[in-house]
Image: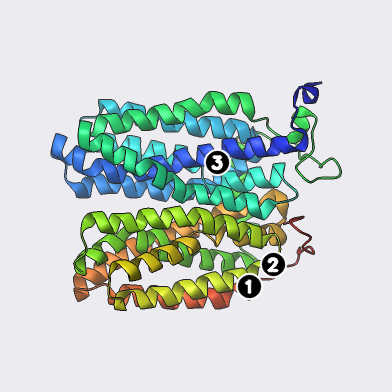
Amino acid sequence: MLAARRPFGQNYAWVVAGVTFLALLAAAGLRSAPGVLLTPLHDSFGWERGELSVAAATGIFLYGLVGPFAAALMQTLGLKRTLLIGLALMSASTGLSLFMSEPWHFLLTWGVLSGFGSGAVALVLGAAVVNRWFVARRGLVMGLLSASTATGSLVFLPGMAALAQSGGWRPVVIAVTVTAAALIPLVLLLMPERPSDIGQRPYGATEDPDDASRGRAVDSVKLALGVLVQAARTPAFWLLFATFFVCGFTTNGLVGTHLISLCGDKGLALVQAGALLALMGLFDMVGTTASGWLTDRYDPRKLLFVYYALRGLSLMALPFLDFNVLSLTIFAVFYGLDWLATVPPTVRLANENFGERNAPIVFGWVAVGHQTGAATAAFLGGYLRDLQGRYLEAFVLAGFLGLAAAAAALWIRRPGAHPSVAGAHA
């Protein structure tokens, strides 16, 4: 029996979580690469940054939009196959860009194709893995996997920037291509489709799960849309969607896109401003993991209330800081701890309202709200900056949205809540 050759027992679920973490790291690195490539491509081909930014925006949008369909595909075609297709598409699309000679080639490879590929290796993958492989410690594991998105940028950005500075855009493309390709054999060797395939139970389970039957890949679109129609009839879905819209608006949409520019308005050097984002990424790993641990033990609605309220107040205060090293470091540490802390409580509320089978798909649709909020803030922040000559209005507006999201979180129902037992059912 295959399980006899697995010395890990139920702990093999942590191996699967580790492989998933690496895949999410790679996807996060790919999504941050276009920002590094803008200047080298402009210098090499003379392409305008506006043209190149369209490709980056397309990739970010598809990264969010593909999520719910990828989650459905994980149910019909299989989680492992979906992940392998995503990694192969990521590697192939970026590798093809080595031969590009026109701006639309960059849009096709780094925008459309890599957007589809990385969308299959998004946070919905983490939600699907957690629901399938874990019964205990779900919040903690979801926190670790969620933190990988910021950690990916933190790990890859400095290296990619160094490669671009010394060798131009091609070494960056090669590095991303090889990284995605290297994960394919790792997934093939170390990631079974489900615990029962190796004669095991999910981590913390005391009885065998009722594994759902697998359908056809063509059913995934129907499944994703059907779950959306069903979920959209409930207030809980729209409250989760709205709060996650605010999450995207206040993180990578406003702060991620415009913090460096705001610091420039305040006289801070580019390197110092970039270091703030790196520091946020470092502390996001701590904050999101801690949020997962808390989600296993406390009411997720109250956690979301605290996260969004503190985020809103800090954003309203930021434009009035002195922008010295001490005040900005305190802000970076605080905001980094809160950056993606909202993900584990949101996933838990999706599980409680929509069931473990449909929750990853629902979370995928909720994540579309996150990316929509991010795109809105990225545009609106620049528009208000051009209109008013300052960022004050944009950050104050984001602050009020954070407070509104905090209030909305308390209205989310918990029909499937379970008593919290030291990291048991999340």
Left or right? Give the position of 177 relative to 301. left
Q: Residues within 10 Å of mark 3 (few under 14, many from 20)?
A: many
What residue is at 47 percent from the left and 26 percent from the top? 182
| Element under disc 1 | helix
Residue type of the residue flagged with mark 2: Tyr
How far apart, in angstroms, are the residues tagged by discs 2 and 1?
A: 8 Å
- Viewer can see residue 273: yes
**Disc 1 target residue:** 302
Residue 97 sits in quarter: top left
Residue type of the residue flagged with mark 1: Lys
| Element under disc 2 | loop
What residue is at 69 percent from the left and 71 percent from the top? 413
Left or right? Give the position of 319 relative to 39. right
Q: Which mark is residue 298?
A: 2
Which tag, 3 or 2, sits closer to the chain's start?
3
Query: Looking at the picture, does residue 125 appear above or below residue 410?
Result: above
